[in-house]
Image: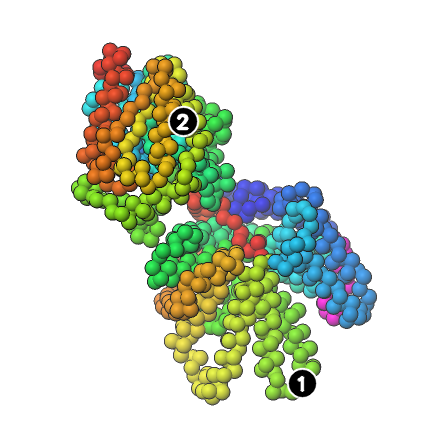
Amino acid sequence: MIVVIRVLSRVILLTAALYAGVVGIAAFLAPRGSEARAVDTRTAPSTVYATATKYLMFMQPALREKGRRVIILGASNADLELRPDVIGRTVRCATIDNLSIGNENITELYQTAQIAVRNRQFSGDTSDVYVLGLWFGLFGDSKARWNGPGRQNNESDLDIEFQRYGNYRKAGDFYESRFGPEYESVVNGLVSPFALIEKVFREATYRARNFFFIRPDSRTDAEREAAVVSEAERAAAVAYWQQQLGSREHLAPAQFELLAKTIKMLSRGRNKVIVVDLPVPNWWDAAVPMNREYKDRLAALETALAGDDAVRFVGLSQYQKPENFSDEVHAKPSVATMIGQDVAKAINASACESTQQTSLTR
Amino acid sequence: MNFVSLHFIAFTLVTVLAYQATRSVTARQWVLLIASAYFISTYMLDIKSALPLVAFLGLGYVLIVGMSATPSRVYVAAAVCLMIGSFLYLKQFFFLTAVGLPFIYATVGLSYVLFRIISLIVDLSNQDIDGKPSPAAYLAYTCGFTTFLSGPVQTWTSFKSEYEKPPAPITEGEVLRALSRIATGYFKLAIVAAAFDYLFQNFSVQFGGSAHGLPWFKTVSLYTVSAAAYTGYLYYNFSGYMDIVIGIGGLLQFKLPENFNRPFSAKSFLEFWQRWHMTMSQWFKTYLFTPIMLTTMQRLPDPKHSAAIGLFAFFITFLVMGIWHGSTAVFVVYGVLMAFGACANKLWQIAMPRALGKPGYKSLQKRPVYIQLCKGLTFAFFTLALTCLWTPEIGQLFGLAGRLGLSGLLVSLGALTLCFAAVDTVLAPVAAMEFNALSGLETRYRDAWTVSRCAGVILAVVFVSAILNKAPEFVYKAF
């Protein structure tokens, strides 16, 4: 027995030493959430964290900085059309954070909102502005959106990420650090080698994966600007979104209830919420009944919240012409900038001007 | 209990330490029994779900104990049929779905328990083994945790000699060899097989389900690559599992038989089955093929029937072996394909010497191109037949076959044959090279090398499992 223990001890000690070495390398390469001033999920692919969900998990400390924040939540069209650099040119009274995650639904948007709220609590009494970039594609049932291997309980990408390493545990609707917030950075540092190794794998297999498995939209801005969406592409998009939404007819009512809950949670205290109805090409109205249902339900929600000064709804129907879009949902770069500027004005009016604060003070 | 889990590692560690802590044969046997009982209990939902397995084991033991010293052939045949009937009923074969038990129960490991019980009954009746096993030895043999899920199918004689051998202190060399084997197993199971599974999942999703509008050639290409990836996945998953259990056997100083011997170096389908899941193939040869041959030859002693009898025996054996893999109708197709492969191979072996003459056929068999094509065809045929294992519904299988068409299947068979032959031509000489300088170094620093390899594999398995976000399942436990 002693022989077995002796040999196993050597294996365990060497494993620990090797792991410590990788922790050191990861610590050297990874951006630190506690040192960053703002969060922008669009930068995730260029960091060691590679994906927006992983980036969000590791960069949470950046949201704990004191000072006013404008926090953008939504899917890939919010990421594209509500760019922090565009909004920041107009909105000077706050730091702009982009927490949007591509291809999410309202369930995941709610989880992202929880990340924001939980971390903002560290900076005391906040007066932040939450900008929700919405469209009907967000309102698919989680059973249709999050299924497949490893998602027995319809776990979202954020669920998967927060469950992956065992450093977080479920607490209420979301997750908390298993060892408490005081040790969160240390524990996240200890699991950071996983992110590093994943990044190395991703980089090493990037070309092969793109060739065989993934069809990313690698068009340049000029190509997107010149794009014309064909009938066949429209038909394919309709089929795709019907599958994503789990229905050819209806959106999930529970997703609208969750949106109302999210708005209520975010607008607590001195915080404000701006609900932006992001434009989609108007051919959707004839293609599926869900866009109409979304508009009706959003209008009903606006009516219900009419007396709430902390919540404002912004419509952008002037951009719905098909020629403004490079595909079925994303605006062309020039149009995206205009949308960002319009939303920035709304943020300014709601947040900076109403508080007489015109510049960022820290 | 997943093999790639802290639970399994802790379980193995406790079992090995408890086993090695004593020099008493009886105490070691009890450690094995308790560990096996605990291991199997992790696959049970509750006590009720374990009752069918308990009843199956009990029936087997009653039939063994009930055998006289010289049992009648009727008793032996009835006992074997009773066990097979119970097995078919409990596994809910597709023709028995209407008469199942009214509760959920576990059938994991049942196939291999059946193999062992039948071998005990037949060997006792043939007086190939001395004496009936004690209840404890019977349970350890049929339900030992290292072999419970999917073998290797150890013979009673081999098991008994290990089970009853006097304990000797384990040496550092034995521990290192066992750990090295376990590390190899985990590397195959959790990394190589997981990578093949990743490829399989990502390719197969592109032509399955709703992807019906794909051009024919793209469907055939994606199917071919998916099928090849699944074969890689199955092989590394299964042989990795075998390395792990054989390695754990090493830590318990309990020698288990090998189950794989470079199966894809086989030059024929029949040779392939002497290298793939060897202990199961040997079992079928001993308890099905040989009895069929002997019985039929007794009835048709004329030598002119011998070739037909051989084909008949191959057909039945491979058909049963295929059907045994699962309880749905798809596995009947799998069995027919296996039987077709074996019979076609046998017919070729009969026809070619007649066509070319014995020297001509021998000369052909030595040609490198012929050898590589034979290897490639063996791989390709097995790969296409394995489609039955990843299309669980018969409608799904026929739907896929309909989309591919005969021409698609032939293109796939040809592409797999040529690609395998080409890859093997390049890789086989490299694999056969002996790096004398490296092997010298390895001998000198063997201990440090083994410890480093184990540490590296532990880290790699943890990283890959976290990245793929799933601990790899052992696929063959479903069969």
Q: Which mark is residue B175?
A: none
Q: Nearer the viewer, residue B150 or A32?
A: B150
Q: Which residue is mark 2?
A: A259
| Mark 2: secondary structure | helix
Residue A130, relative to residue B315: is it above or below? Answer: above
Q: Residue furthest top?
A: A356
Q: How is the image coloured?
A: rainbow
In contact (CB < 8 Å): disc 2 and disc 1: no
> For residue A44, what is the image quadrant?
top left
Tell me where residue A230 appears, x and y as whole percent: 25, 47
Which residue is depicted at the point 35% across and 57% down?
A: B214
Dot 2 crowding, Cα within 10 Å, few <14, some 14–19, many 20+: many
In this picture, is B4 found above or below B392? above
Q: Amino acid at mark 2?
A: Leu
Residue at the spot x=35%, y=40% of the render? A288
Residue A211 image offset from top left, x and y in percent: 30, 52
Q: Nearer the viewer, residue B21 or B401?
A: B401
Q: Position of residue B25 (x, y in %)?
A: 71, 52
Distance, label 2 to label 1, CA atoms, is 82 Å
Q: Report if residue B53 is visible in the image.
A: yes
Q: Which residues are magenta?
A: B120-137
Q: Which residue is mark 1?
A: B301
Quadrant of the rendered structure where residue B321 is? bottom right
Q: Residues within 10 Å of mark 1 (few under 14, many from 20)?
A: few
